[in-house]
Image (cartoon, rainbow, N blue to C red):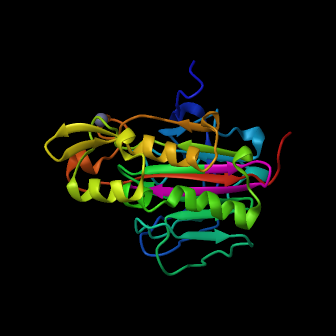
Amino acid sequence: MNRDTPRVNRIDSGSTIQLRSRVTDHGLRITYGPGQMPTRGLITLPAFARRRDGVRHFFGTRHDPRDVGALGSGDESVRCVVSVTQVHGTDALVLDRPVKGGETFAGGWDALVTDQAGVLLTIRTADCLPVLVHDSARNVVAALHVGWRGAVAGIVPKSLSLLHQRFGSTPESLQIGIGPSVGPCCYEVDEPVLSRLRAGFRDWRSVVGEAGPKKCMLDLHALVRRQAQGAGVDGDRIRSVRVCTACHPDLFYSYRREGTVKGTMISGIMLSRRRSR
Ligand SMILES: [Zn+2]
C-alpha cells in the first residue's frame, strides 16, 4: 500500500470518543465532558503522524461531521475542543497555556497552535485545504485553514516561522499532513485570483494549468506544498491525501460542486498526554 494512501475509519472499527462538543461559527467553543459517540468516515495519514508519536489526527468527511475524533481514552483523551471563526487570513491563535472550559476568543483565526496535550485543534473546510503540522521534537501541533487567499497571503510559511520563533521548531523536525481539497481537475480560477497569485507567489506558473482565455486551473495543494518546501521542509516530510472534494460527492461537501455551503468537513490534531515510545 502506498504510504500516503488515506485510511478511512469505518463505524465498525469500534472507535469511540470521549467528549461532547458543538462546533460554532461564533467564536471559540470548548466543551469538556463524558459521552461517547461512534465515529466514521475519518481519514488519517499514518505516514504523517502515528499514535506512538504522541499525536492523534484526522481529516473529516461529510459523514457525521460532529463526530470530531476517534481519539482514544485515558491518557490520550480529549480535554477540550478548539473551534474558531475562520476568515481566510493568516493570523494564528497560540494556546501555550492550559485552556479553560468555556473559554472564548473574539476575532478570526486561520491557524491554531498548541503545545498542550489533550487540546484538540479543529478546522472546518469544504474546498479549502486542511493542513496539519506536528513537531515531535518540540511537542507542538498546528492546524491551518488554507484557501487561495490564505495561501497567497502566506499562511503556511508564516505559521512555520511562528512555530520556529515561539517553540524553536526547525524544518527538520516538522511533519506536515495535507488533507483533501478541491483539486486542479475542478478548481477553475480567473483573473482576480490569478493577479493575486502572481503578486504573492513567484513560482505561480508551476501551480496552474491553462483552462481558456484568462482562466486557469489552480492546484492549491501544489501551491501549499511548494510553500512548505520553500520554508525548508523536505518533501518527504509532507504527506497528502490528494483526493478532490468536488469529484467525490460520496465523501465530501464541496462548494464548487454544489454551488452553496451545504456543510463542512472537520479536521483536527491533538497531542496525547503520554507518548508510548
Ligand atoms: Zn476534481
Residue that protrudes farthest toward the top in the picture: 1
Whether residue 61 is visible: no
Q: Quadrant of the N terminus?
A: top right
**Image quadrant assignment for residue 264:** bottom left
Residue that protrudes farthest toward the bottom in the picture: 106
> How many badges with numbers are in the image?
0
User: In the shown orientation, is residue 224 left or right of residue 262?
Assistant: right
Whether residue 181 is visible: yes
Q: Quadrant of the C terminus?
A: top right
Secondary structure mostly taken by the magenta-highlighted segment of the chain: strand
User: In the shown orientation, is residue 68 left or right of residue 96?
Assistant: left
Is 37 magenta? The answer is no
User: In the shown orientation, is residue 192 left or right of residue 235?
Assistant: left
Placement of 251 over or under 232, stated as above or below? above
Is 141 magenta? The answer is yes
User: In the shown orientation, is residue 76 left or right of residue 182?
Assistant: right
Residue at position x 45%, y 70% in the image: 85
The foreground one among 269 and 155 is: 155
* Residue 63 x/y as whole percent: 41, 44
* Residue 33 x/y as whole percent: 64, 64
Placement of 107 over or under 167, stated as above or below? below
Residue at position x 61%, y 40% in the image: 15
**Image quadrant assignment for residue 111:** bottom right
Residue that protrudes farthest toward the right in the picture: 277
* Residue 195 x/y as whole percent: 28, 57
Residue that protrudes farthest toward the left in the picture: 213
Which quadrant does ligand 1 occupy? top left
* Residue 76 x/y as whole percent: 74, 50
Placement of 206 over or under 214, stated as above or below? above
Magenta range: 133-147
The foreground one among 268 and 200 is: 200
The foreground one among 31 and 179 is: 179
